[in-house]
Amino acid sequence: MFFRTLYASSMRAIIQRVSSASVTVDRQIVGQIGKGLLVYLGVAKGDSDKDAEFIAEKLAVLRIFADEAGKMNLCVQDVKGEVLIVSNFTLYGDCRKGRRPGFDAAAEPEPARQLYEKTVKLLADKGIKVETGVFGAYMQVESVNDGPVTFLLTVDK
């Protein structure tokens, strides 16, 4: 069941709790944060505004930062953290067959861009500082994973 769910087409995000992160395009830093979340966001064929709303809400309220007792009880808003969202169609690379990943489940560029931008806007509308990469560009991402703490989030369909 997990295997089928993981490879079913739905918006997905890799979420990393970081001390800092940045994304560079053509030797220029285009997005940079301190403490917060580095999010790699992939959009699948058939994803909708509702999926972007789910991801944005989850990113805002997911309790993955430690409280004074060391328990994961605080969200990015509680710690006044920032979010760096990087578009990443390779999250839909299907490596189950052959030696080269297939990307049939990934959304076409324009619908993917619209949902990526919608997710960014929805998160920013919650008062969270959001930085981004450049959609569709070749990017270099640097981060200091805090923990390490990394989660995979998918939208159930």
Image (spheres, rainbow, N blue to C red):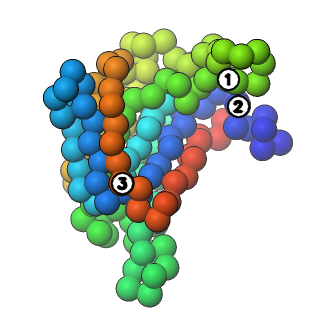
Q: Nearer the viewer, mark 3 or mark 1?
A: 3
User: x%, y% of residue 145?
Assistant: 41, 56
Q: Residues within 10 Å of mark 3 (few under 14, many from 20)?
A: some
Which SS class for mark 2?
helix
Tell which circle, 1 or 2, labels the residue nearer the N-terminal end.
2
Q: Between residue 58 and residue 71, name the one nearer to us.
A: 71
Residue at the outermost bottom position: 69
Query: Disc 2 residue type?
Result: Tyr
Q: Which residue is mark 3?
A: 144
Q: Quadrant of the C terminus?
A: top right
Q: Residue 45 occupies which quadrant of the picture?
A: top right
First in sequence: mark 3 or mark 1? 1
Residue 156 rendering spot, x and y as whole percentages: 65, 41
Q: How many neighbours does mark 1 have within 10 angstroms: few (below 14), some (14-19), or many (20 or more)?
A: some
Marks 3/1 in contact by CB < 8 Å: the verdict is: no
Give the secondary structure at mark 1: loop
Give the side of residue 25 with respect to residue 136, left or right. left
Residue drawn where x is 38% and y is 85% of the image: 68
Q: Quadrant of residue 118?
A: top left
For marks 1 and 2, give the CA distance: 8 Å
Q: Which residue is mark 2?
A: 7
> Does the residue at mark 1 contact the one at mark 2 (Cβ under 8 Å)?
yes
Question: What residue is disc 1 on?
Answer: 94
Task: Measuring from the top left, give residue 97's x and y in whole percent.
Answer: 78, 18
Residue in the picture at 53% in, 25% down = 90
Extreme residue in the right direction: 1
In the rendered view, does 78 fall on the left or right side of 11? Answer: left
- Answer whether labels 2 and 3 touch (C-beta < 8 Å): no
Whether residue 44 sits left or right of residue 29 in the image: it is right
The three-letter amino acid code for the residue at tag 3 is: Val
Q: Residues within 10 Å of mark 2 (few under 14, many from 20)?
A: some
Residue drawn 22% across and 38% down? 31
